Image (tube, rainbow, N blue to C red):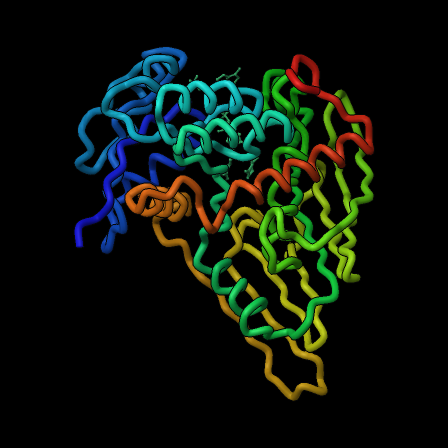
Amino acid sequence: MSLPTLRWAVLGTGFISTQFVQDICEEKAAPKANHIISVIGVSTTAKGEKFANEYVVNGQAKPKILSYEEAITDKDVDIVYIGLPHTSHYEWTIKSLEAGKHVLCEKPLAVNRKQSLEMVELARSKKLFLMEAVWTRFFPIILELQKLIHEDKIIGDLNRMVCDFSIDMGLDKLGPESRVKNPKYAGGALLDIGVYTLTFWRLFLDDQFGRDTTKFEVKSFQTIENGIDVVSSAIIKHADGKSAICINSFLNNSPKEMVRIDGEKGTVYIGGDRRLLSEPSWYKIEFKPETGLAPIEKTVSKGAINGLIHEADACAKDIAEGKTESSICPLDETLLVMEVLDEIRAQNGLKFPEIKYE
Ligand SMILES: NC(=O)C1=CN([C@@H]2O[C@H](COP(=O)(O)OP(=O)(O)OC[C@H]3O[C@@H](n4cnc5c(N)ncnc54)[C@H](OP(=O)(O)O)[C@@H]3O)[C@@H](O)[C@H]2O)C=CC1
Ligand SMILES: O=C1OC[C@@H](O)[C@H](O)[C@H]1O
């Protein structure tokens, strides 16, 4: 069977666009799709040329270097990857969909649910593929853990989870234009890394998706400094009694065990070699003494890839099959997470300036 082919326009040449293009261009023993970097959309041509020369390698043809506007309308593009700051996601997703392109947009899909819903409704009305790039959902180790916990019920019925993704960002040393600290780019821990703790809550505490989720309520606190949250903590309590504590900080790093999921028979711990919850690389399952079961441990290595290829391959497969939405990262899940992000900000009075729909 021939591999699906996808021609990409990559918008932005920053950190994540680099990681994405590196993964696409990395030579693979058993590729799952043909990815072609057709266009790099950039703010300045010189930046684009440098980026293309450095990263669009290993037999890829030289991509066109175009403005964002030209990139999203280029005839040789099937899908636009949006690697821009949070506050640019809405504009460039809407414009790309209007131009008839599929879209893979970095997380969070937008700065709030209202923008996100508009993006989702436009994609659905145009029958185009749209996905928030929550790459972690596609990691083989995550899919394996979902099966162990929800299908095999390895720790039985679940009781609670604690999830902490924190990064000591060294905020004082970052310049004022840094997207993670500037409120005008919707900076702060919640929108940058809170998306992942909420993703782990969605992946592991609930076996339902999006609109069918178990009913829940949220109570939260944020420490706000200079217009952004440097610490966010939320407790999510499900109607059936299960609860999750989700913690994010820009002042300290994550603990070694970033996720702990307690069930009636034992506990699952999840960690990563870089203490980034976005990149889990090991798990450990300990059972209660009365089960008589021995602990299980597994560590995986990413090898030469950064880990973004899994979501790119999934896009190629879904689009080749005529799907407009991912079943692993569905839009209703994105909308639900956006709703909780809004709720946490509303409870703590965190508003970003210059943002439509606040
Ligand atoms: N999946 C993951 O693990 C990660 C995801 N992300 C997400 O990716 C997105 C981009 O983050 P990241 O790559 O770290 O950001 P960077 O600041 O490194 O890059 C952002 C790029 O956006 C372009 N840009 C357009 N307008 C602006 C503006 N006003 N200010 C700054 N840059 C602008 C620039 O590209 P140019 O000038 O070249 O056109 C810039 O290179 C965010 O949504 C973030 O949440 C980030 C890191 C990791
Ligand atoms: O998505 C992300 O994960 C890793 C962090 O370093 C980064 O700030 C964030 O955007």
Would you identify the image quadrant in which residue 266 lies?
A: bottom right
Tally the numbered discs: 0
In the image, taking residue 219 as reference, residue 228 lies left or right, namely left
In the image, taking residue 119 as reference, residue 314 lies left or right, namely left
Q: x, y (%) of residue 341?
A: 69, 36
At horizontal 38% and vertical 13% (from top left) the residue drawn is 69
Q: x, y (%) of residue 195?
A: 61, 40
At horizontal 55% and vertical 75% (from top left) the residue drawn is 296
Residue toward you, 164 or 328 = 328
At horizontal 50% and vertical 50% (from top left) the residue drawn is 137
Rendered view: 166 above or below 300: above
Q: x, y (%) of residue 102?
A: 37, 31
Of the 4 image quadrants, the one containing the C terminus is: top right
In the image, taking residue 111 as reference, residue 342 lies left or right, namely right
Q: x, y (%) of residue 9?
A: 33, 26
Of the 4 image quadrants, the one containing the N terminus is: bottom left
At horizontal 56% and vertical 65% (from top left) the residue drawn is 283
Would you identify the image quadrant in which residue 342 lies?
A: top right
Would you identify the image quadrant in which residue 154 lies?
A: bottom right
Rendered view: 18 above or below 285: above
Rendered view: 261 above or below 139: below
